[in-house]
Amino acid sequence: MGWNTGYTIFEATVVGAYDLGKLDKELLTVLMEPYRDSDIDSGGSEDLKSKDGKGVEQIVIETWGLEMPKAPPGKYDDDPDAWDAYNDTVYDKFSEVTGHFGWR
């Protein structure tokens, strides 16, 4: 089990900066740096959403300049395999960013 509280704080900070229209790659880098080489754990997620409905993963992916994967149509129950593959792809993109900071 990792550092859940760190992720809770990170999530709130990123979503808040994004909602203010202040988040860019440079600021995201500054916000991620204190968590370098930590055991930050997404188990601390509060599933916060920005004013336009984005979660922290999407905000981080797009702010870093990566393309957000396209979600499958319908709901999870309609095609669990497609949604699981989508979630894995989102995790991989998010990890591509967090890997720059040694998140474990």
Image (spheres, rainbow, N blue to C red):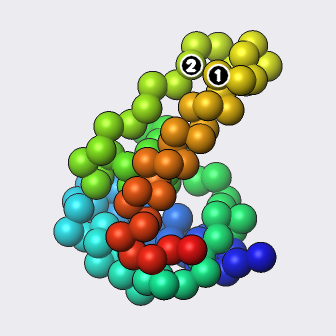
* Front one among 55 and 19: 55
> Residue 39, position in %: x, y?
61, 81
Per the image, label 1 sits on a secondary structure element best described as: helix
Q: Quadrant of residue 26?
A: bottom left
> Residue 101, position in %: x, y?
39, 75
* Front one among 58 and 17: 58
Upstream in the sequence, badge 1 or badge 2? 2
Q: Residues within 10 Å of mark 2 (few under 14, many from 20)?
A: some
Per the image, label 2 sits on a secondary structure element best described as: loop
- For the point 64% across and 64% down, the residue is 42
* Front one among 15 and 104: 104
Q: Which mark is residue 46?
A: none
Q: Which mark is residue 72?
A: 2
> Residue 65, position in %: x, y?
24, 48
Can I make out residue 19 in this image? Answer: no
- For the point 75% across and 23% down, the residue is 80
Direction from residue 43 to residue 98 in the image, left or right: left
Q: Residues within 10 Å of mark 1 (few under 14, many from 20)?
A: some
| Amino acid at pointer 1 | Ala
> Residue 67, position in %: x, y?
32, 37
- For the point 48% across and 84% down, the residue is 37
- Mark 1 vs 2: CB contact within 8 A: yes
Can I make out residue 11 in this image? Answer: yes
Q: Quadrant of the C terminus?
A: bottom right
| Amino acid at pointer 2 | Pro
Q: Which mark is residue 82?
A: 1
Direction from residue 53 to residue 17 in the image, left or right: left
Query: How far is disc 1 from disc 2 in space, using C-alphas?
Result: 6 Å
